[in-house]
Structures are given as structure tokens and as C-alpha cells.
Amino acid sequence: MYHTLLNSPVQYEAEMLLPTVETMVGVLYFGLFAMSFDFISGYTGYLSFGHAAFYGTGAYTVILVANGKFPLLGPETPFMLSLLVAGLLAVVVALLVGLVSFRLSGVYFAMITLGFAQVLYVFIRGWDYVARNPRDGPAVGPSHASGFDIGVPWVDQLNLAIGVLTGDEVSLLGTTLSGTTVSFYMVGLVVLVCYFAMQRIIHSPFGRVMIAIRENEERAVAIGYNTYVYKLAAFCMSGFFAGIAGALFAGFRRSASPENSFYFLVSGDALLASIIGGFGTLAGPLYGRLFDETVREFLSKSGQGGGLLPYLRLLLGEGTLSTPVVGGMTVGGLIDTLLNGHASLYVGVVFVLFVLYVPDGLLGTIRNRIGGTFADALPAKLRDEEE
């Protein structure tokens, strides 16, 4: 549908409104990270401001394995196995952080997790084992030159490579899918599996205890649950999926740096996505990230995909853009002043508006309107119509 719109009479409007496929791949793996953040923060009520530590652990693990710097695993290790190792290593980190942090609650829990993440961030910036210049972070070396394979390990026919420039191209029904498009589907497949796994946990008896802790932890303790163990287990599960998200990020980008993996603002972006999408909705943070990226790309500069600025330049033409408006400033200059490079400013305004007027987020508000999740509301509506 995306390619159909780009080749239709509304091509320019589609380019202006829709994010690029490469952006959508980023939405998927970061959306998974935001969902893992929501898994612990939205369902137990414990805000983990140090979640970037697990994301970074996953990203660095994949690159270290690919570069032959991870103990017992060589560069030939299948990516799917590296993905699993990345998730398990993130679980170990989550366990160590959680053992100490869950002795606290509220803002103290948020601050201590943030403190642990910052310690890891500073450590990784100075650890020259991971890269020649650890401040810039590691990149994948000559191994996996054709991209990381997602599929069934050791069965070449059931794998497709992902990567910005290295992904496999696929011809299907007379259409050739680019490497980036194939990456979108393969990364999306892993994200979908992780999402269903988290959904299954949330709807299990274990998940109901998580929600009981969020609603009233003292009552959960009073009826016999060891909430410390439940919170710690949920934190480890959340760390596992955050590690998988980081591994997908490194697998697609083939590099990582302390700033885009371990830094506390990475957790801040997950918080932003969760607030926009809806806390305690699991899928909401994915939509929140999509909304965030769409707004940023819509207000992007020329040359970074579509967006409003290139569209206005194309629509208005040179004659209109050079028309003076106020004090010698032209229409083009005024548009540049208002739009160029100010995406973060407008995203901040949108964030404030969401907190004030849509406190339940996009998905939370929709669920409130229809009286539950789509899975619950749709059958009920059909039954009502039959009666």
C-alpha cells in the first residue's frame, strides 16, 4: 500500500505524511523497547528510568559476538542465537539491578534504576575493549558483510538478511522488495512474536498479580503474594525484551554508541512513547513511537525523507517563496524560521498537550471509548447486534 500511494496521483502528499520505510524499521525495534518499558512500568507501577541499560546491553552483545569478542561465541554465530544471548545477558543485568532496586519504591526506585544505568553508561564510554574509541561505540567488522540473518539458524533457505544497505532483496509477485523493506518485515516478525509473548504473560495468573501490585501492593501482600519475587521476575522479563530490542537495533544499524543505547534519554524516549500511546496498554507505546517519529519526519528538513517543509517548497514555487513578507523576510525565510530544525520543539508541545488533554494516551483513550480492548469490545458488539 505504501508503494502504491507513492506511485499514485497523491504522491507528494503521501511523501509528506508517511514516514519512510527505514524510519518504520526504527519504529518497530524501538517500539518493542518501549513496550518492554511499559511491561514493567505500566503493569506494576514501578517506573524504570534505567531501562536503557538493558537496551544497550542487547545492542553491544550482538556487535561483540559478530566481532568475535564475546567469550565462547565466534563471529560465525547465527544472529538469532546472538539475539537470544543478548536477551539473556540483559536478564542478568536486570536481575542484579532489580535485587537492589526493588527494596525501594516510588520515585526512589526510579532514581536508583537511573543511577545504575548511568554507571553502566560511564563505564561503557571508557571500556576500550568494546571499540577502539569507546566514546563513539563499536561497529560490526568484516563479518556478516551481507547483513544479519533472521529466520531458522543454519538453514539458509529460511533466512533473510536485514540491514540499511546490506539487507536481502526479494522478488515477489512481480515486485522487488528492497533490503530495507525486507528488514521491515523481518524485524516486524520478531517484534510481533515478542509482543504476543508479553501479551500471554500479562493475561496469565502471573500478569494478574502484576496488575494487583500496581493497583494495591499492600493488599497483594496481605493475601499472600511475595510481591518482591513477582516484581523481580517481571523486571527480568522486561529486561529480556529490552535486550532483544537493542539487538535488533544493532543488527539493523550495524553499530551502536553509548549515546543511542545506554544513555538515560533513551529511557526518556520510551517514557515519551508510553505516555503518548498509553500506559498499561502494551501495544500503545508502539503507536506512541510511530506518532512521535511521524511528527518528527513531518517537520524534518529537506533531504531527510518527506515532510512539510519540502512539500511547501514544492507547492509554493520559487516565485511565492521569494515574496517579501515582513521586514525584508521572504515567505521562504518565514517558513524556514518556523519549521526548519524545530521538530523537537513541536514534539515537546505535543507531549505537553497529551499530558494535559489525553492522559490515557492514544490507545488508552480509544479503549475507554469502546469499553475495553478491541478483542473484548468487538465480540460484545457483534453479540449485541445479533440480539
Image: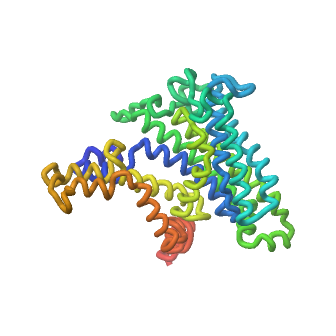
Residue furthest out toward the bottom: 387
In the image, 246: left or right of 239?
Answer: left
Figure quadrant of residue 43? bottom right
The x and y percentages for residue 196 are: 61, 52
Instruction: Identify the colour scheme used.
Output: rainbow
Residue 347 image offset from top left, x and y in percent: 44, 59
Q: Residue at x 58, y 53 (%)?
A: 34
| Position of residue 117 measured from the top left corner of the image (x, y, whole percent) | 69, 48
- 189 on left or right of 299: right
Tell me what residue is drawn at x 49 percent, y 48 percent.
27
112 sits to left or right of 306: right
Q: Is residue 191 above or below residue 78?
A: below
Q: Nearer the viewer, residue 85 or 153?
A: 85
Which quadrant of the figure has residue 38? Answer: bottom right
Vertical comparison of 363 with 293: above or below: below
Q: Residue at x 57, y 39 (%)?
A: 248
Residue 379 seen in the current view: no
- Residue lying farthest to the front in this orientation: 327
Residue 229, picture quadrant = bottom right
- Residue 260: image x %, image y %? 56, 43
2 or 119: nearer the eye? 119
- Image check: 215 left or right of 152? right
Q: Is residue 302 above or below residue 385?
A: above
